[in-house]
Each structure stands twice: as C-alpha cells, then as structure tokens.
Amino acid sequence: MKKTSAAGSRSTRPTSVKSARPTWRATGSIPATLIPGDGIGPEIVAAVVDIMKAAGAPFVWERHEGGMAGIKKHGDPLPPKLIDSIRRTGLALKGPLATPVGGGYRSVNVRLREEFSLYANVRPVRTMVPGGRYEDIDIVLVRENVEGLYVAWEHYLAIGDDPHAVAISSGVNTRAGSRRIAEFAFDYAVKNSRKKVTIVHKANVLKALTGIFLETARDTGKKYAKKLTVDDRIVDACAMQLVLNPWQYDVILTTNLFGDILSDEIAGLVGGLGMAPGANIGEKAAIFEAVHGSAPDIAGKGIANPLALLLAGCLMLDHVGRPVVARRIRRAIDLALKQDGIRTPDLGGRHKTRDFVKAVIGNLGTR
Ligand code: NAI
C-alpha cells in the first residue's frame, strides 16, 4: 500500500528518549546488564553483542539469567543478583522472557517494570524493507507501562463446586501516572521533531479507568499546543485506522493494555515482530528489549531475526549519549537489508541469524 497522507516528513532521524540518567560520560566504557532470556533470546542476544562489539559500542556486559533460564540456574525467574545488577548499572539489554499462560509465575517483564518504575515504554517502528504491504511507515507508540489493567489485581469467586466460577480484575490509572507518561510522550515528540500526538483511549465505555487518562493527557497537551498537534481517538477506531491509513499517525500515546496490543499491530505493518524495538524508561533505570517474545517455535534453529533487539540496542546507545555508534549500526542494517538483500525467513528471506550478523558487521565501515 502507498502513502495517502503524512503526519510529517521524516526519514531516519535518531529516536532519542528522555534520559533517565543524564550523567553518562561521552567517552569510556559503560557497565550494562545483559539478560540472554529464553527461547530465541540467547541466539539474538549473542548476535547483538557481536555487532555492538564490532561497532565500538561502549558497553561492558554483566550477564544474568532470568525467566525460565533463571529458574533452571537459580530456581527463581527473577534472581536477586539480576535485580542488583540493574540497580547498579541503571541499564539493561534484555532478551525475551517466557511467561506461563494462565497459572505459574507472574510475568518477569511486568515485575521488572514495576521494580524499577519503568513508567514509559517507547516503541518506534518504521518501514525498513521496501516492497511490503505498507511503505513509509514511521510511527512511535508511547505506552504507559506500570498502571492500567496490567497491575493484575485479579481474583476468582467460587460458586458451588467451581472455585473459578467468576474472574475479577481491577485496573488502576492515576492522575499523577497519566500526567507523567503524557509529559514524557509530548517531550519525546518535541525532542524528536515529531508533529502530532494522538491520545488513544476507551473513555466512552471505561469512563473512569481510561477517562482519567484521556482527561489528564488532553490537559497536559495544552502546554504543547504551539509545538504539536494533539488529537485523540477511541482504541477500536484507532486499530482499524492503523490498517486503512496508518500514515495519519505520528506519535501514539496510550495506556498499558492498549499499547501492548497496538504496538504488535504497528509492527505488523512493517513486516512483523522481528522489526520492532522497545525501550522501558524510568527515573533510575532503563531496560531495552525487542517487542516480540521468546518465539519457542523457532528457538535453536538459527533463523531468528535479531533486528528488533539490535534496534533496541541502538535506542540504548542513543539513551547513553552515543548516537554516532547507533547511526553507524542503523546504516549498516539498511545496507544489509536493501543492498545485500540479507533477510531471515520472517521477512520472506532464506538467510540465517548469523548471515545477518556477518552482513551488518561487514557494512559497519561503509560510508
Ligand atoms: P512471540 O513474539 O514469541 O512469537 C510470535 C510469532 O512471531 C512466532 O511465530 C515467532 O516465531 C515469531 N517471532 C517472534 N520474534 C521473532 C524473531 N525475532 N524472528 C523471527 N520470528 C519471530 O509470541 P508468543 O509465541 O505469543 O510468546 C512466546 C513467549 O514469549 C511467551 O512465554 C510470552 O509470554 C513471551 N513474551 C515475552 C515478551 C518479552 O519478554 N518482552 C513479549 C511477548 C511475549
């Protein structure tokens, strides 16, 4: 599909995020926590570490297991040593962590976001492989990351001999939390030369839970009226419009659950989950990861696409004030995809993870 209208003219500009720790030095090494994760995690993390090293990234990795790998090694999906390491470094690159569906332990991803108050989830997506369903996509989704329905205050009520006859879940959105994420999204938009922020909600039905979010975000947006266009949309209409005319969107600001769902949809516009990086930002720490999960169906086959995690690594470089290295990697990715035609099977190619690593490293020196 071709572009029918644009929110603003943009290309490959940096996607810097509000700094949680504005004190990273411009030179020298930077300690960072590395979580290989589950499923394809170790394969794509190894790929990204190799490319980062070849590109001259400053990170000195402290490696710690979490998720299923944490259980295997330490009997704990979120070992205290992992938490201590992030507390020390304030910075982590994380492979996907598996979460049991239904019962079992609570999502380690959600617990990490809560532990470090990583209230902002930034998910930038743009078209990198031409010839797909949609050209020229360039959308950033900013998701509130610690409130909403993901607080998971859930319980069952028993009726008769069925202990799980009724399931109840409460969502929590606060005015302070809504203002904090709204300010983050508007500041991000201004800093990254974006033109428009769309607030996405369901305040027509969830009048209190998402009403407070809409009302606070609209109010916060008034301060930015000279620099940005601010509008809003109900989540179901937004989901449909993302398929019909995604170019009308620039920055989307939304609540936790809607952000989780819409960011997968946006990744689908540009070739799937293998293309979508994410940054979880708080005041004292930031964790960078791919939007996708542990992909158990392809784990160990050597065909996982490391691009989303590599792009998350580029966001991490921007975050610590090393945009030159990030730019070098992004350029090498573009050349590997477009000039060399190196693509993993999820992008319609036949190449392996290591072919992509080799191609990106080979293009790092190219001007
Ligand atoms: P998934 O994202 O792991 O996989 C969905 C589909 O996309 C699969 O067909 C998979 O092969 C494909 N895919 C995902 N990443 C890919 C990549 N890099 N290259 C090529 N193909 C890729 O979602 P699913 O199957 O629902 O979840 C699996 C596990 O991951 C679950 O335990 C879930 O809880 C966890 N998960 C973890 C996340 C995180 O750590 N941030 C996020 C989402 C899910």
Image (tube, rainbow, N blue to C red):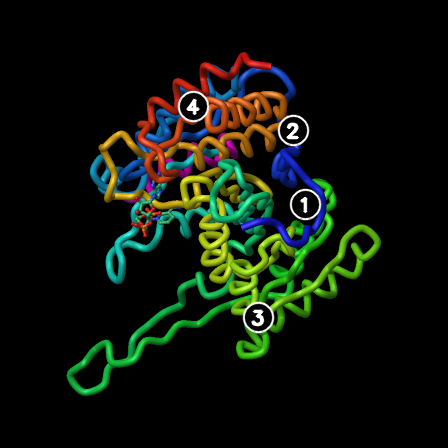
Lower sequence index among marks 4 and 3: 4
**Extreme residue toward the bottom, this view:** 160
Q: Position of residue 89 (x, y in %)?
A: 50, 30
In magenta stretch: residue 166: no
Disc 3: CA contacts within 10 A as few (<14), some (14-19) or many (>=20): many
What residue does disc 4 label? 61
Q: Secondary structure at mark 4?
A: strand
Q: CA distance from mark 1 to mark 2?
A: 19 Å
| Residue 190, placed above or below residue 101 | above
Q: CA distance from mark 4 to mark 2?
A: 19 Å
155 sits to left or right of 94: left
Numbered circle sitting on residue 210: 3
Q: Is the residue indicated by label 1 positioned so its CB lies within 8 Å of ligand 1?
A: no
Numbered circle sitting on residue 188: 1
- Mark 1 and mark 3 in contact? Answer it, CB < 8 Å: no
Q: Is the residue indicated by label 2 positioned so its CB lies within 8 Å of ligand 1?
A: no
Q: Position of residue 41 (x, y in %)?
A: 32, 35
What residue does disc 2 label? 23
Question: Which mark is nearer the camera, 2 or 3?
Answer: 3
Lower sequence index among marks 1 and 3: 1
15 sits to left or right of 56: right
Q: CA distance from mark 1 to mark 4?
A: 28 Å
Towards the viewer: 225 or 171: 225
Give, as a single range, the part of the protein colored magenta.
Answer: 76-91
| Residue 80, placed above or below residue 216 | above
**Residue shown at 63% from the left, 55% from the top:** 249
| Residue type at the position of mark 1 | Tyr
| Residue type at the position of mark 4 | Trp
**Residue shown at 44% from the left, 62% from the top:** 151
